[in-house]
Image: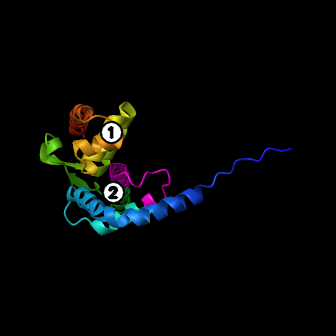
Amino acid sequence: MEDPQPTYEPARGAAEGKATLDELMPGYYAELRRLAQSCLAAERPGHTLQPTALVHEAYLRLASQYKVDWACRAQVLALAARMMRRILVNHAEAKKAQKRGDGYQIELDRELELIEGGQIGIQPLDEALTRLAALDERQANIVEMRFFGGLNVEETASALGISSATVKREWKTARLWLVRELEAV
């Protein structure tokens, strides 16, 4: 007798995840909108991508995920922050390709204002975060959640399953590393 082969049905899981996300979305919408406004506040004035469009694009990407605990607010916001970062980077790359210009500049928050002028292109920041992730993925995740996601220390700790003290220590180290990396740009 032949053993039945296990079947993998990602579409079913994705559909169930989307249904759960759809149920919880009204509660998350205000937070996602705040996240989008926070991300776009760092962008140059007159950015063509609006907070509502960023939220909707992030929602479409979230809906395709099916291994997410949608009831865990910190996990959903951390994932949304990562997706919004990618959306902004992709948007900047597309605009840069169209204009062949310098790309977008983002206003760095007070945590990274040590960099002269307080502005840096989204692409150099993304490249620096990618390099940081190669050295220390947890630090890169912390920066992403704090900077792009606007999560506080406790929310970041909850999302990553680590202590607040560890987040504070890693955040301080990552900020110093980023300042050094971005000053060279």
State the mark number for residue 88: 2
Q: Relative to 133, does residue 19 appear above or below in the rendering?
A: below
Between the C-alphas of marks 1 and 2, the distance is 17 Å
Q: Position of residue 100 (x, y in %)?
A: 34, 58
Q: Secondary structure at mark 2?
A: helix
Viewer-proximal residue, 100 or 128?
Answer: 128
Residue 129 in sight in this render: no
Q: Position of residue 7 (x, y in %)?
A: 68, 51
State the mark number for residue 115: none
Compare marks 1 and 2 and give the one earlier in the sequence. 2
The secondary structure that dominates the magenta segment is helix
What amino acid is labelled 1 in the image? Ala
Q: Tell me the crowding category of disc 2: few under 14, some 14 to 19, or many 20 or more residues within 10 angstroms, Cα based.
A: many
Q: Position of residue 82 (x, y in %)?
A: 36, 50
Give the residue displayed 34% in from the left and 61% down from the top: 95
Viewer-proximal residue, 15 or 98?
Answer: 15
Residue at the spot of label 1: 140
Judged left or right of residue 160, residue 170 is left
> Image quarter for residue 10?
bottom right
Viewer-proximal residue, 25 or 55?
Answer: 25
Q: Is residue 64 magenta?
A: yes
Circles 1 and 2, Cβ within 8 Å, touching? The answer is: no
Give the residue displayed 30% in from the left and 60% down from the top: 32
What amino acid is labelled 2 in the image? Leu
Q: Secondary structure at mark 1?
A: helix
Q: Is residue 149 magenta?
A: no
Q: Position of residue 185 (x, y in %)?
A: 25, 41
Judged left or right of residue 154, residue 11 is right
Q: Relative to 126, does residue 19 appear above or below in the rendering?
A: below
* On-image quarter of the N terminus: top right
For the magenta stretch, what is the residue range?
61-86
